[in-house]
Amino acid sequence: MRASRYLIATQKETPSDAEIISHQLMLRAGMIRKLAAGLYTWLPMGLRTLRKVERIVREEMDKSGGQEVLMPAVQPAELWQESGRWEQYGGELLRMNDRHGRDFCFGPTHEEVITDLIRNELKSYKELPANFYQIQTKFRDERRPRFGVMRAREFIMKDAYSFHLNAASLDDTYQVMHQTYCNIFDRLGLDYRPVQADSGAIGGSASHEFHVLASSGEDAIVFSTENDYAANIEKAEAVAPAGERPAPSEAMTEVHTPGQKTIEAVSQFLGLPAERSVKTLLVKGEADENGESGLVALILRGDHTLNEIKAENLSGIAEPLTMATDEEIEKAIGCKPGSIGPVNLPVPVIVDRSAAHLADFVCGANKDDYHLTGVNWERDAPLGRVEDLRNVVEGDPSPDGKGTLEIRRGIEVGHIFKLGNKYSSAMNATVLDENGKSVIMEMGCYGIGVSRIVAASIEQNHDDKGIIWPDAIAPFQVAIVTLNAHKNEVVAEAGEKLYNQLRQAGYDVLLDDRNERPGVKFADMELMGIPHRFVISERGLTAGTLEYKGRRDEEKQDIPVEEALAFLVKTSPKGGL
Amino acid sequence: MRASRYLIATQKETPSDAEIISHQLMLRAGMIRKLAAGLYTWLPMGLRTLRKVERIVREEMDKSGGQEVLMPAVQPAELWQESGRWEQYGGELLRMNDRHGRDFCFGPTHEEVITDLIRNELKSYKELPANFYQIQTKFRDERRPRFGVMRAREFIMKDAYSFHLNAASLDDTYQVMHQTYCNIFDRLGLDYRPVQADSGAIGGSASHEFHVLASSGEDAIVFSTENDYAANIEKAEAVAPAGERPAPSEAMTEVHTPGQKTIEAVSQFLGLPAERSVKTLLVKGEADENGESGLVALILRGDHTLNEIKAENLSGIAEPLTMATDEEIEKAIGCKPGSIGPVNLPVPVIVDRSAAHLADFVCGANKDDYHLTGVNWERDAPLGRVEDLRNVVEGDPSPDGKGTLEIRRGIEVGHIFKLGNKYSSAMNATVLDENGKSVIMEMGCYGIGVSRIVAASIEQNHDDKGIIWPDAIAPFQVAIVTLNAHKNEVVAEAGEKLYNQLRQAGYDVLLDDRNERPGVKFADMELMGIPHRFVISERGLTAGTLEYKGRRDEEKQDIPVEEALAFLVKTSPKGGL
């Protein structure tokens, strides 16, 4: 491509509303432009990279036996009503009416559509397993779209759905997809980790997320210092502290704590560390057969935080997790939220494993402005049900018993699920088995955030000059910068010649033939992250050389003109066809 | 691809709700499935062809200097309000509200979005001309979606938009795009015609449609028998009849025509051919400064039909064209619609060229149940304004004076427009010219119905056995059918060997290794339209041969096994890479 005939929409200034580096650099390098909140146009320079990501995803999905399909973006409400998600899915589902007033949505995901298709198309176990995927524009009406294409409302996703006669077959395909995802992220040159994850609202029995590690990541990922254990913080198990609970050594004492409402305030007031106290959170319990639901108390060590996903997954707790209001608390307990505690608490109690290990602790007295010190389980309050309720913290022991946990930030770029029969059962998607018996299919689903990967790659690959693309997804692998070519025909001709030579060898080449100052051209090529750069100047040509600089190189080097292609092939063998 | 691991979703029965052959065959060949009215899922077999069409369109657009972008499908109402189309566009615009209640639409086209982008990005005449395109999912909420993907609601379109300093530059790019479209449709193997078209609601000064000729086409296209003249019927000019209008020879006479309300009935009642009568249609006139609009009479020869586009484009006529109601007619004229005529008509009159050439004609008497015979222009009724108001009919003289017109059916697959400054002016999209003066850009836009092309190609390429794909867009170019391979290892091995050999040579190959009867396999490969078929049987291998049959061939032929690839390369040199 000749830069003079191409939209090079670089910007010097960092846009004020772009919070993270990938968003800033995608705007500055002229890859995207904002149309409205969470809606972005991909400019030519950005789309080239996006298409290369798509291509890698497609090639690996094809290799894994996936069959590409394309389902409509607009989906009829009837199917979502059949699965139950029309009511369950919140404000993120963009709903609309057609001209006849019928309900539709802009698909954020396609479980219903594919399940409907497959229940009509596949009749026999002989046709299973089968795995269908698409690379498609999705819409999620995020309450707060941000970070550019990282958390956009309209985005491109690869979604795949597999169908199986039984769970063993699903396990096999799940493993194939796990490996396929590793292959994809390897080829994309990303530093990523597969981590255990909660399967969340989409349902199902097991799932892994694939996270690109980056300090700007919105998700916390938990690693073992000693082995391969990795989990989303929502999923990471907080194990019980080692050893027996210490025996009581203090007497329970009521203390007047006027105006002290938080753990921090009470701890400071009493001169005790927060880990010597417990906090008591009241949430809605599961509704009984009459639709009535009481409150349930969740008790955590004062310095720990509630893991809402873990709590929500427990029996006896309403889903979604719903905190009791101040009014409900006052009515049930007779005090404000800051003064609740487990002693003589008139609601069922679930105690976190770490809180259950405390002795002589501080808690609310269920009376405004009063706390209790020297409280002990069993002696002062029954220790009923003990569960894992909290988020792990750094230094916690690893759940597999080896090493301790550390926490890093990640950007979720892939997610694989064992859906089981959640959708196939709700939508009665069956096949006939070997005995001619109708059986509900097992399903898996497998997503990749294609457009998000572009941003995630930049989070990992940039410096103060701009983006540093891996060759595999660079919009152009090579930049040829001609200096003063408009005044010097020999330079212009040498540029054209190298341009044609490298293109014929299969490289994507950007010939910067613009009538701009050398500094402007160099800065643009660096900002846009082109991995390899040749500079053609009158002085160089006189000496028979071109100047080469890799985007990550400190130094330039002179290369004889006729060796440029051979040098590039040696430096970037995969850059070509 | 191995058919045993691929969704071969063929159907024997012709679906009852599919009216045209392409819709029937796309369903029967397992290319598409209906999700809801006008919404189709592309199955693997269909998507392969769709992607090949996309690729050809993309390659030719790139060659023409087009720069690919990707704009959001969901567009904010504000831009459509700026262009004025939010109000103008009717029920086909799928409107929606996001979670914050803001207005958006699912883009049926992207003039506003690209104009907004370019007014922000391009500042100088030096950056012009520029042409941006995308291949994207669009939505038009058709009142009556039909014919499968031919007239779907969600569909894939290539839309391009060019920007220019002046009209001369737009003319140049328009010609380039005209040629590019010819290149695309040539490569797609379509029998098509570029035809002059009205630029319609999208606005602008000139346009051509590209039609695939097919008897099932929804559009009438007009050709000259003698030269290259071709136009959409909306646009085709009906020239004035040759010679002078004959002199009056009859006296005007009022005739009682009780209950005769149509041209046909009156003609029959009077024993005169319809071409000796005129019909008078009353439409709304253009509103005056007070917003009041009177009626205008349009007068056509009795056997001719009104061309609404031509009428709407005339000065003095309300846009969109609005027929007067029976009540309005009775109030203004004092009779029912069936009895109107130009004699003493109290509203302005526009006479079609052919009607203006009549003498001694029949018309309504502006009195219920009465007509006039022997009427003559000037003598009995003033012949004021004469215009081209009617649709041409077969046998009309060609507007360029050479030959006569014939009418055929076409499927519109492409449309190019000179938009002029319709959008750039409304949205103030300017650049600085050579003198530093701000000027409104000129624009062109260029669409191709990518998904529609797949159906249009089938309309032109099929027989009673199914689809006949051109090599360029066949889902697979070659089918290898092994007979009884599950029982015969030699056959299975020969199939695998040829499969690998042809794939390595760059062909898309479908190996039909299914455990099905030969007749089923042959019928499926023919239904799906695979252009080249090799059959591997035990008997053939014993003789050292394979059987070859081209999809259009009458006869099979035996080919020595080792010559299969060379034979294919000779038969379909473009089938490979």
Image: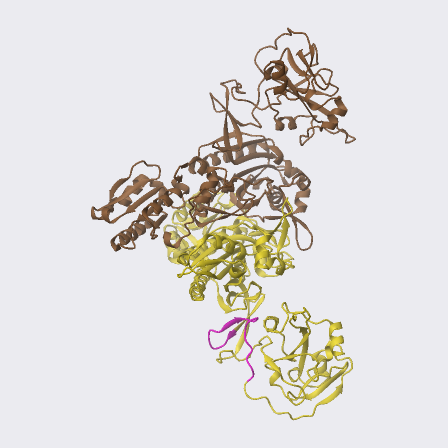
Chain colours: A brown, B yellow
> Residue A346: image x %, image y %?
75, 19
Pick the front one: B95 or B438: B438
Instruction: Please name whichever residue, A445 or A3, is drawn nearer the observer in this view of the structure.
Output: A3
User: What percent of the width, then of the height, locates residue A377?
Assistant: 67, 12
- Residue at image point 65% right, 71% down: B288
Q: Depth check: give the residue in front, B457 or B477.
A: B457
Query: B451 or A542, which lies in front?
Result: A542
A1 left or right of B328 in image: left
Expressed as whole percent of the image width and height from the top left, the position of residue B275 reads 64, 83
Q: Is residue B462 left or right of residue B260?
A: left
For the point 72% across and 18% down, which residue is it? A366
Residue B234 magenta-drawn? yes
Is B406 above or below relative to A124? Answer: below
Examine the rendering and report whether any part of residue B557 can be seen: no
Overall secondary structure of the magenta section: loop
Q: Is residue B37 above or below residue A169?
A: below
Q: In this picture, which residue range is highlighted in magenta?
A: B223-241
